[in-house]
Amino acid sequence: IYDSLLHVEKMNALNVLTGGIAHEFNNVLTPILGFSQMLIKKLDDPNLKIYAQMIEQSARDGAMIVKRVNEFTRKEAAGEKEPCDINDLILKSIYMVHPQWKEEELTAGKKVSIYTELKASGYVYCNCCEIRDVITNLLINAFDAIETTGKITVKSWDEDDNVCFVIEDDGIGMSDEVLEKIFTPFFTTKTKRGTGLGLSIAHNIIAGYFGTINAYSIPGYGTQMVVKLPLYNPPAHDAT
Ligand code: ADP
């Protein structure tokens, strides 16, 4: 019995690892797909158009592979840490998800406006890719929560020894029952493209930096996802 339990644990660990890589890979593919679709529309030169179509096709192939790998969670190895400007990461994440949203707005007639109020001035000492991954996941969830027309607001501020940000949407919101489970791996209410991993990965990443992530939501009104990360204190300059 002990051996078979160990086996189950090992298989779980493997699935978690595979899933984590697949999930991150998908985040890399999203802007490649979005921007290549934009290029295909904008380029006049037929040769260049073919190149862009090839990029798009490869990104689609990659997305298919990710689809097949259907058991996910987070990869363990984080890259280099450095002082990160949270406002910069927020703006980059918005820029990266934007083409994909535009595409959906065109195909599904959805209209989402995005506003920013970025007042944080402190830095966080993190791996920037991981934090961008968290922000991207929160933005995608906010977008998905809006059914037709809505608004997403991203704010950042300094608070005591923390740098904080919130991603707010006026979408469908969550019941207490859903709220209780959102950080559980594989919990999803989405029928298409939901893996139930975005928030569990986000939670792991933020906890890894001794930060917090909290959800506040009212069904029918919307959701606020609040992230707090410890402020980076640069080493004092040697005055000699
Ligand atoms: P996924 O997006 O793949 O479903 P997540 O872990 O990111 O996985 O989210 C888990 C669930 O939490 C979602 O399926 C959804 O039910 C709920 N959720 C997350 N963010 C929001 C939001 N902004 N508004 C409403 N529901 C949300």
Image (cartoon, grey):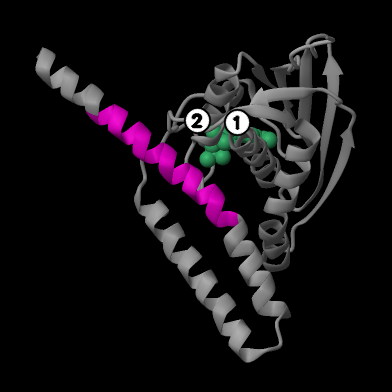
Principal secondary structure, stretch drawn in magenta: helix
Residue 239 counted in the magenta span: no
Residue 145 vs residue 3, the one in the foreground: 3
Measuring from the top left, give residue 167's x and y in whole percent: 76, 33
Q: CA distance from mark 2 to mark 1?
A: 7 Å
Residue where numbered disc 1 is placed: 127
- CB atoms at circles 2 and 1 under 8 Å apart? yes
Q: Quadrant of residue 19?
A: top left
Mark 1 belongs to which amino acid? Asn
Disc 1: CA contacts within 10 A as few (<14), some (14-19) or many (>=20) = some
Mark 2 belongs to which amino acid? Ala
Q: Quadrant of ligand 1?
A: top right
Q: Quadrant of the N terminus?
A: top left
Would residue 16 be seen by someone viewing this image from the given angle? yes
- Image: magenta residue range: 11-30
Measuring from the top left, give residue 115's x and y in whole percent: 87, 43
The structure residue drawn at horizontal position 32% and vertical position 35%, both measured from the top left corner, is 15
Question: Cβ(mark 2) to ligand 1 < 8 Å?
Answer: no
Measuring from the top left, give residue 240's x and y in whole percent: 83, 9
Q: Secondary structure at mark 1?
A: loop
